[in-house]
Amino acid sequence: MNLQPYVDQIRKDGYVVVPDFLNDEMVEKLRHDLAPIFDDIGSRSSEEFGQQTIHTHNLLAKTRAVDEVLMNDQLLGLIEAVLGPDFQVSGVAAMRPGPGDRRQHMHRDDGHYPLPYPHQPLIVNTLIALDPFTVENGATEVVPRSHLSSDKADADTPTVAVEMPLGGLLLWDGAVWHRGGGNSTKNSYRRSINVNFNLAWLKQRENQFVAVPPEVVLEMPEKLQALIGYKLTNFGLGSVDYRNPIETLKKRLREKNELDSAA
Ligand SMILES: O=C(O)CCC(=O)C(=O)O
């Protein structure tokens, strides 16, 4: 697949859709494997925002169902084309706006990092559609080209609702103003997997080192270990005694096994 047109569009407009990212079989498997997680997603209400969906975060600590999709070459190729080679997974969440959920407040995902706008891309955020995204069920609303501007958006700023088919992939620059849309349907949910990538020299949104237990990390393929942060960045950033922190986990496991077998 030629990634360049997608990369050009994300640079220009701040977002892009790959409509045929996952085939039906892959979608079905993800829906099946993630069913217990999606079934648990609820909403909460506040005076300020009304009824809002509550996302399930830290999916990598809760299920192995998304590992494969995170290592997808097409996905990683697109992220690398925007962020450069040194990026990591910042967070992985399940999102399922349901009937009656109101749209989110307008926000920028890279607001964690207090830098003046515009700036180089720090984050590429993604949503994978496990239901078609429609205006009615809460398709994400974006402000095109807002990543190139220091202007603030608010509830009245014109947006584009990003409708996409089942299995589609939405990517956006973390500087783009956007919000999850409201779900006005009676009984349709908008299931989606959210994978947030950022530059590897920035702090991750979800603390993967604490959230994912060491024994789970050690079972992961090396590619996934590196994606969640077990690697060295920019001359040793993130090291333990100059080495990849995965070496420390392996050493601790060996020591524990020795202790257990001596007991
Ligand atoms: O669900 C969506 O469409 C976007 C979600 C989002 O932007 C967020 O929760 O920060």
Image (cartoon, rainbow, N blue to C red):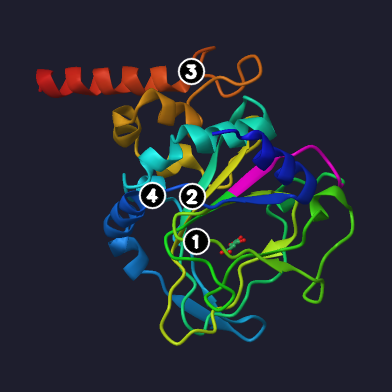
Judging by the rendered image, the residue that carries numbered circle 3 is: 244
Amino acid, disc 1: Pro
Q: Is residue 170 left or right of residue 15?
A: left
Q: Is there CB contact under 8 Å for labels 4 and 1?
A: no
> Dot 1: what SS?
loop
Q: Which mark is residue 107?
A: none
Residue at (81, 76) in percent of width and height: 156
Per the model, the C-alpha gap separating discs 4 and 1 is 11 Å
Q: Is residue 62 left or right of residue 160?
A: left
Q: Badge 4 local density, few (<14 within 10 Å), some, or many (20+)?
A: few
Q: Is there CB contact under 8 Å for labels 3 and 4?
A: no
Which numbered disc, 1 or 3, marks the residue closer to the eye? 1
Decide which of tag 4 and tag 1 comes sooner along the chain: 4
Judging by the rendered image, the residue that carries numbered circle 4 is: 23
Decide which of tag 2 and tag 1 comes sooner along the chain: 2
Q: Is there CB contact under 8 Å for labels 4 and 2?
A: yes
Q: Is there CB contact under 8 Å for labels 2 and 1?
A: yes
Judging by the rendered image, the residue that carries numbered circle 1 is: 165
Decide which of tag 2 and tag 3 comes sooner along the chain: 2
What range of the chain is rendered magenta? 117-125
> Dot 4: what SS?
loop
Q: In this picture, is 18 found above or below 248?
A: below
